[in-house]
Amino acid sequence: MNAFEANFDGLVGPTHNYAGLSFGNVASQSHQAELSNPALAAKQGLAKMKALHDMGLVQGVLAPQERPDIHTLRRLGFGGSDAEVLAAAAKQAPRILAACCSASSMWTANAATVSPSADTADGRVHFTPANLTNKFHRSIEHEVTGRILKATFNDEQRFAHHAALPGAEHFGDEGAANHTRFCHQYGDAGVEFFVYGRYAFDSSKPQPKHFPARHTIEASEAVARLHGLNPAKVVYAQQNPDVIDQGVFHNDVIAVGNRNLMFCHEQAFLNQAEIKQQLDQALGGGFQVVEVPSSRVTVDDAVRSYLFNSQLLSLQDGRTLLVIPEECRNNAAVWDYLCELRDGDSPIDELKVFDLKQSMSNGGGPACLRLRVVLNDAELTAFNQSTRMSDSLFDTLNQWVDKHYRDRLSEADLADPALLVESRTALDELTQILKLGSVYPFQR
């Protein structure tokens, strides 16, 4: 049976702002308190989705979260009307309010870990929403994320949905940002590659000293069990703690993979040579690696340009495309290296550059914005087709953004009751466009 890798991108929400909430993410912290443009952010993301759709790739849309999150603010003791909740939070705990207004669900690489049906014991596609326990503003996402995923992949015979792992640091799970699947053909049984930052139950193991290791090996092992994966087809690797301390908060900031190819920095993993050997053995041979040396691209240049937060895509004609942000072209060392790859005999045949500055300024590039889901022919027709990118959906969503989104937003605007009304009105309409049903707390 034919199989395809679909990319489901997160639609940027109406409260996109720069609150600098993500310790360990250099871009997020360095742009704190700048004015954002939610409308432009959403349209930049939509333009990337449409471009990949136009190339013949399967492209879907995942809805944003409800923000401001009044439900969570009430759980934290703020009472009264919605407007009074916002006013009290702004006065007493403005950083908590900012966290409850974050549009970070746009980065759907963190939405979940996905295992294709070719890899799982029951022959269904499995989804586990990430608990994202390391950051409060992200830890409040997984319940609604699960509902959105169920509304998008809503055939129980073909799709299996799990609850997020327990919300404790021992099982810190960052989703597909720390997970890659390798295969020769998408429909083959693949090798699932889980990358973790630390051991939660063994403090003697290496871990970073400055920035947090957000993802634990215990979380990866739990997801592999839940998804019914073949242990012989699972490889675990630890991120290099030194590069975490240089701003590599997720594996997708230092490595990306597609089919039998991994594109990574030479400092990405501990025991990197052994990891590459394990992947080749589990894949049955034919594993390819493009390993970037520090002498050509430093870790700092990789983090600032988001070189590895790119999308490796297989085009219909068999060529391999690397989707990169504009920041890669603006970095001389990175761009020179990429052009050499493209023009030489590397497996990377083509480069495509996108302007994603609104997302990049908050610490998320092309790969952050997408959740990869391998689907066979039957599964491709079974998911909610209203969420599949098309010419008409692209036009509809751009009109929806024009109607509901602001073109500038500051942290002070987050307490504006009108923003809450605007956001809920927009999301209510979006659930009708995407045929999601009642996925948000305000709709229930």
Image (spheres, helix red, strand yellow):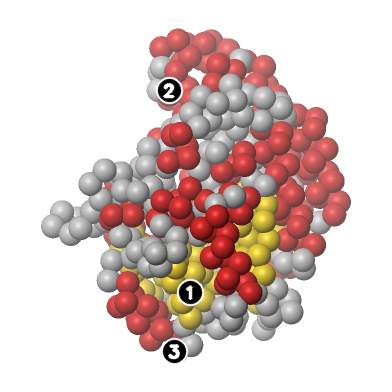
Name the side, left or right, on which 32 lies relative to 381.
left
Nearer-N-terminus badge (1/2): 2
Q: Secondary structure at mark 3?
A: loop
Q: Quadrant of the C terminus?
A: top right
* Residue 69, horizontal then vertical, whole percent: 53, 28
Disc 1 or disc 3, which is closer to the eye? 1
Question: In the rendered structure, which amino acid carries the disc numbered 1?
Answer: Val
Q: Secondary structure at mark 1?
A: strand
Please name the residue that numbered disc 3 is placed on: 284
* Residue 29, horizontal then vertical, whole percent: 44, 34
Q: Residue furthest bottom?
A: 285
- Quarter assignment of residue 348: bottom right
In the image shown, does 89 or 38 lie closer to the viewer? 38
Name the side, left or right, on which 331 lies relative to 277.
right
* Residue 407, horizontal then vertical, whole percent: 71, 27
Please name the residue that numbered disc 1 is placed on: 290
Nearer-N-terminus badge (2/3): 2
The answer to whether one can see residue 310 in this image is no
